[in-house]
Amino acid sequence: MANPDRRTLLKGAMLSGVAVAGARWWSGASAATGAAADALTLRQALERVLPDHCEQIAWEPLAADDGTDRFEIEGQGRHLLIRSNRVLSGLAGLHWYLKYVADAHLSWAGIQLDLPARLPLPARRIAMRAQLPHRYLLNDTDDGYSGPYRDWNDWQRLLDLAALQGTTEMLVTVGQEAVYHRMLQEFGYSDAEARAWIPAPAHQPWWLLQNMSGFGGPVSARLLDERIALGRKICRRARALGIEPVFPGYFGTVPAGFAERNPQARIAPQGKWVGFDRPDWLDPTSPPFAAVAASFYRHQQALFGDAGFFKIDLLHEGGRKGDVQVPDAARAVQQALDRAHPGAIWVILGWQKNPSPELLQGVDRGRMLVVDGLSDRYEPAPDRERDWNGTPYAFGSIANFGGHTTLGAKAQVWLERFHAARARPGTALRGIAWMPEGGYRDAAAMELFNELAWRETPIDDLPGWFARYARFRYGAADAHAESAWRALAQSAYRLEIADYSEPPDSLFCARPALDVATAATWSPETVPYDPEQVVRALRELLQVAEPLRGSDAYRLDLVDVARQCLANHGRALLPRIAERYRQRDRDGFARLAAHWLDGMRLLDRLLATHAHFLLGPWLQRARAAAKDDAERARFEYDARSILTVWGPRPAADDNGLHDYANREWAGLVGGLYLQRWQRFFSSLAVALETGAEPEAIDWFAMEDAWARGREDHPTAASGSSHAMAGEALALLDAAPTF
């Protein structure tokens, strides 16, 4: 593993004071340089996340014993003292303190830091240790669905949050396109050919997975340089915080024409992936592979430094092995990795048929880590010990697909299956993996899931945990807040849908049809809980004590729960609209369709009250990354298309990728989505009046035109979240009953 000194034990240290920026920090004399650097890193992190209180916090190094991450928190005089064996565990301790002592919360979806001038101190010493060594963060798709044009400020906040959550490994792909760009020029491709093969940032994750190439390109030399610089900053900060960057590894992806330029190469054509031409696969057992892989890793290391973990998904989602012997190919891939990075860990996603028995047959399984994307799916639960023959793995969840704005998770399944896996004799379980396809969603789900790795004993009262979450989420005990989250715990967070790990998406985001059941092709088709429980949660949240209503976290949750109520209402309403249409009840159809559209307009106004639900910042980041208007147009289409058509017509229409990344954002709901439903209902109204068939609408043409648009959208929130959530509840209460 890379940088093993970070886990070096700090034993037998005589404590000596080190003054850092005016506060008294502590380091071990026997490891003065390392401990002083750790103290400085912690201090800088505290200045970012708690600038008004960092002077009240001190740190001491803690002997690591067996290397397990651990922390202790207690009061020392008027200061909060954090002891930890490294930076990362110290920040995890701070996060635990904020939640369970200070009643405060930092998350990627809402913040509440209403702290008193003097920090409260623990009544007694709190000591925790990680129960598993690996806590993995991010899906391969994250850079596409969460923020392809994030800047350093965005990444800095994400890295701080990852450290507070105790993340040990995090996927980092920013700038990796430059590795391919440089490598290909050593094997017969020009600078222009290599840049044309690389997609624009929002679509790069699927290129790295060997699914597609080129869409939205070519990328410019300037963009490559800027993303190299950003990737380097991300890696430096991650390493300083104690997070291992996980880089893409090389397994043979090449552009068309590789064999013509390199005659000894054997190529396995990969066919199609949902309408896209897949890049070719260079047979890892053919002569050029070792040299190509060596070039890849040489350039990667020169640009971004060393790493100990590499994400390699051989034959991902329908990849074709052709005449290649998979065990031999896997062995060659691991050997190339090992030559470049001796002892490195091959990380692979547990997804569909991967890793296959053939693949595992050819590798040293002890140097693999399977991050399981299916731990909470299917009945009965997958037997990963049997499936992967004892290969080390992390219990994982893909609790969100495409970045859908939807609320809920399979929380009870996590508790049951995770602890059953831990208790299994000789278990190969080595960690957890939080891998939503789109991040910045559902803070409660993320909080609960990441606590699995730190709690020695299982949570035996899930509604009780959610009630306690309400306290630190909003800053104080409140009966209405607790009641709201208990209702959510017994509904949205107790999903009972065997074949899925996410809740259903919103039909407001769907291509209109009277019988449509999902917006994204592969989403759940029904709400698997009592929607009235979510309405109950909204009623309770609206009654939370006024002093707690000002936080970002409260306002975000209020909007989110009201949004979910409206989305659930839409699912109940559409069959009634369809029935009135089939009965040719023009008045009834018109009234219900008007109610649907009123709900969408209200939803857009509700979403506009919190920045988390705005389309504008997503587009603004894409524009800001460009150097001129032509590039701004390409980047904006890249950012808009990933949310809507995803790709060209064959992908969107013939293969169902349209609206895969749908989300209820102000600007999208009141823009494209509302336009679609207005046009659809208008066509049905005309059909009822004339007796003719409804208009055949070319949805792709409409969506692609929107994706190529350049209109501005607000980048700042407006209006009262509380008032608009109240209007949403009133609309539900006044819904037509005929």
Image (cartoon, rainbow, N blue to C red):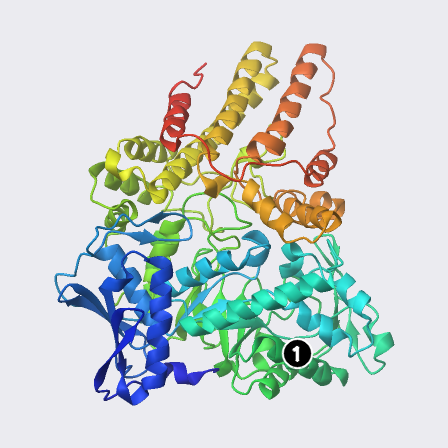
Q: Is residue 108 visible?
A: yes
Q: Residue 172 in the image: x percent, y percent?
A: 54, 67
Q: Quadrant of residue 101?
A: bottom left
Comparing 712 with 249, the one in front is 712
User: Residue sitting at 41 percent across and 32 percent down?
Assistant: 565
Question: In the rendered view, does 45 fall on the left or right side of 182?
Answer: left
- Check disc 1 and report its element: helix, strand or loop: helix
Q: Residue 73 in the image: x percent, y percent?
A: 21, 67
Q: From what the image shows, is residue 484 above or below residue 390? A: above
Question: In the rendered view, does 8 fall on the left or right side of 206?
Answer: left
Task: Identify which amino acid the numbered label 1 is placed on.
Answer: His
Q: Residue 559 in the image: x percent, y percent?
A: 41, 36
Comparing 87 with 135, the one in front is 87
The local crowd at label 1, few if under 14, some if 14 to 19, many if 20 or more residues have their Cα within 10 Å, is some
Tell me how many marks there are: 1
Comparing 133 with 693, the one in front is 133
Question: In the rendered view, does 546 fall on the left or right side of 678?
Answer: left
Q: Residue 506 in the image: x percent, y percent?
A: 51, 37
Q: From what the image shows, is residue 583 above or below residue 276? A: above
Q: Quadrant of residue 322?
A: bottom right
Task: Identify the residue position indicated by label 1 in the image.
Answer: 299
Q: From what the image shows, is residue 399 above or below residue 226? A: above
Identity of the residue furthest to the front in this view: 22
User: Residue sitting at 31 percent across and 43 percent down?
Assistant: 490
Q: Is residue 165 visible?
A: no
Question: In the rendered view, does 167 fall on the left or right side of 715?
Answer: left
